[in-house]
Image (cartoon, rainbow, N blue to C red):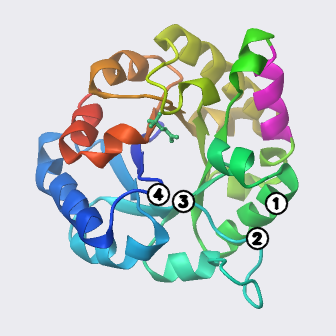
Amino acid sequence: MRKKIVAGNWKMNTLPAEGVELAKGVAAGRGEVCSCVNFIVCPPFTHISEVAKALEGSDIAIGAQDCATEAKGAYTGEIAASMIAALGCKYVILGHSERRQYYGETSETLNKKMAQAYANGLTPIYCVGENLDEREAGKHFDVVKAQIEEVVYNLTEEQFANLVIAYEPVWAIGTGKTATADQAQEIHAYIRKVLADKFGAAADDCAILYGGSCKPSNAAEIFAKEDVDGGLIGGAALKAEDFLAIGKGF
Ligand code: PGA
């Protein structure tokens, strides 16, 4: 049985007090959603500590949105995986398209970040996905294959057993444009095949999340697909009610 996951990527939104309110709202309504759904919230670094306190006693996990390539030292402005782990994070989003696009993240840097995440007991939520030009040119399969081969293929079997993948077509992120459930299923199944080519049957246990304008009105249809194991939610994760409603999509 694969894990069902609904993860909220708050991106660079909320002030600390707002983040705490949001987290409390999610915790307050969590009981209305199947306990089979694993909720994760990923606040900005600055609120992780306070959000963790607000979520004490709940089953909602916390993730960070990124981590440094290095363990520690003279890297001004960076946040080490050990630091976020010490605050109570269990997950870390790595390779989000906004980081690849705006901050020049490459497979080379992501390999280092993955190593740091695992060295500190964090489960990476590794993001893949094509942009609009690549989709229109029919290159989306090749793009996600390369993103997986260049990073995920370097993991050990033990590390792979502790990995979540998020497929997020760049053209659907924050645009209101969602991949259809069939488009999501098609590429999720392909991703699972690419994973199976390297890791065999273990690929069946890897949760693959869909991300990109996922909301209460479309979550159920997308989550109903065989190879879709949940969602990585941006905009709709900023309202507790919507985030919880997405969880009810299972
Ligand atoms: P969105 O973002 O739900 O606002 O489209 C998803 C993401 O980037 O993780």
Residue 138 percent coordinates (x, y): 79, 10
Question: Mark 4 highlights which residue?
Answer: 12
Q: Is residue 148 above or below residue 108?
A: above
Question: Mark 3 highlights which residue?
Answer: 65
Question: Mark 2 highlights which residue?
Answer: 69
In the image, is the residue at mark 2 within 8 Å of ligand 1 by its beta carbon? no
**Mark 4 vs mark 2: which is more N-terminal?**
4
Q: Label 4's element?
A: loop
Q: Can you tell which of label 3 and label 4 is closer to the viewer?
A: 4
In the image, is the residue at mark 3 within 8 Å of ligand 1 by its beta carbon? no
Q: Residue at x 50, y 30 (%)?
A: 212
Amino acid type, mark 4: Met
Residue 41 on the magenta segment: no
**Mark 3 vs mark 4: which is more N-terminal?**
4
Q: Can you tell which of label 4 and label 1 is closer to the viewer?
A: 4
Locate residue 147 relative to residue 188 in the image: left or right. right
Q: Is residue 60 visible?
A: yes
Between marks 4 and 1, how big is the CA–CA gap? 21 Å
Q: Is residue 34 visible?
A: no
Q: Is residue 154 above or below residue 66?
A: above
Q: Quadrant of the C terminus?
A: top left
Amino acid type, mark 3: Gln
**Mark 1 vs mark 2: which is more N-terminal?**
2
Q: Which quadrant would residue 219 be assigned to in this image?
A: top left
Q: Can you tell which of label 4 and label 2 is closer to the viewer?
A: 4
For the residue pair 229 and 172, the one nearer the viewer reads as: 172
Q: Residue at x 25, y 60 (%)?
A: 23
Question: Mark 1 highlights which residue?
Answer: 109
Q: Which quadrant would residue 222 be assigned to in this image?
A: top left
**Label 2 near label 1: C-beta < 8 Å?**
yes
Between marks 3 and 4, how big is the CA–CA gap? 9 Å
Which range is magenta? 139-149
